[in-house]
Structures are given as C-alpha cells and as structure tokens.
Amino acid sequence: MRRISLVAASAAMLALSALPASAAMASTTHKLSFPRLSGVQAWGNYTKVAKGLKINVCARDNKRGVFAVGAVTEAFNSTGKLHANLGAVSIGYHQTVCRSMTLRYTAHLKVYTFTANNKGMINHQTKLKKVF
C-alpha cells in the first residue's frame, strides 16, 4: 500500500513539474499610452508572456483632411540593437484598424504615432515614447 501511495505521489509531482512556466505565473495586461497627434486616436495594451510581449494596438482616423493614421509599437532587446515592431494603419475618416501579435524582444518597449498622405509619405510623426 505504501509503495502505491509513493508511486502516485511521484507521478503527481512529475505531472505538476511538467507544466509550462507560463501556466504557473500570472500575467498582467498593461495599457499603452501613445503620443498625441492631430487626427490620430491610438490605444492598445501589452502582456508579458513566455515567448515575448503580446501586443494589441489600434489606430483611428479622426480628421477629414488626413488620409491615413498609424500607431506603432517597437520592442527592443537589452542592447537596443535588435528590435521588432507592430503597427496599425487606418485609411479613411472614422476608420479603425487593430492588430495583435507577440513580439519576441522584451527589454524595452517604445511607441509612436504618425499621419500619412495619399502618396504613402509620412506627413507627421511623433517622437518615440518610452513605455519601459
């Protein structure tokens, strides 16, 4: 009887230790605050997950005279040499576009917004705003 209990306890410990680290830790979702730019409404959030940063970003065109607007997030490694980005670009007045993706770099996160014309050129772009 003792041997069966020991085997059952060992099997339970082995099963629990096989869970991925992400199942053990609780992740918190944080809101993103984008720099203001006329005609651009941008919002989003991020969560640190096992494979990087799970990012959701949205952009809305709020001005008739603006052809397109965008909101961009950039994630960097610890040296700042490697990075990945995720952006949402909305074309047309009162149009909203949202994008989601997991970016693999987690050391630094920065955001910016921009407006563009109908030739694909960026008219205005804010400075990079450091999130962390």
Image (cartoon, rainbow, N blue to C red):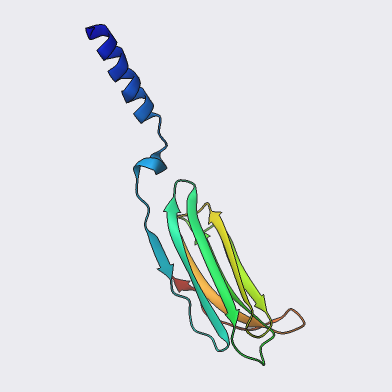
Nearer the observer, 49 or 73: 49
Q: Is residue 121 above or below residue 26?
A: below
Q: In the rendered image of this protein, does residue 59 appear above or below residue 29?
A: below
Residue 35 in view in this figure? yes
Query: At x 52% / y 63%, what residue is drawn?
Result: 56
In the rendered image, the residue lying farthest to the right is 119
Q: Residue at x 56, y 77 (%)?
A: 113
Q: Nearer the viewer, residue 61 or 122?
A: 61
Residue furthest left in the image: 2
Taking the spot 36% from the left edge, 29% from the top edge, the residue there is 17
Q: Residue at x 49, y 69 (%)?
A: 44
Q: Pinpoint residue 130: horizontal percent, then vertical percent.
A: 43, 70
Q: Please tell me which residue lies in front, 3 or 103.
A: 3
Along the line of sight, the residue nearer the viewer: 67 or 127: 67
Image coordinates of residue 31 in percent, x first then y, are 41, 68
Q: Is residue 82 visible?
A: no
The reply, left or right, for residue 98 in relation to residue 128 is: right
Classify 26 as above or below 85: above
Q: Quadrant of the N terminus?
A: top left
Outermost bottom residue: 65
| Numbered-mark total | 0
- Quadrant of residue 132 in the image? bottom left
Q: Position of residue 27 (x, y in %)?
A: 37, 53
In percent of width and height, residue 95 lies at 64, 79
Q: Is residue 31 left or right of residue 114?
A: left
Q: Which residue is farthest front? A: 1
**Can you say whether 24 is above or below 89 in the image?**
above
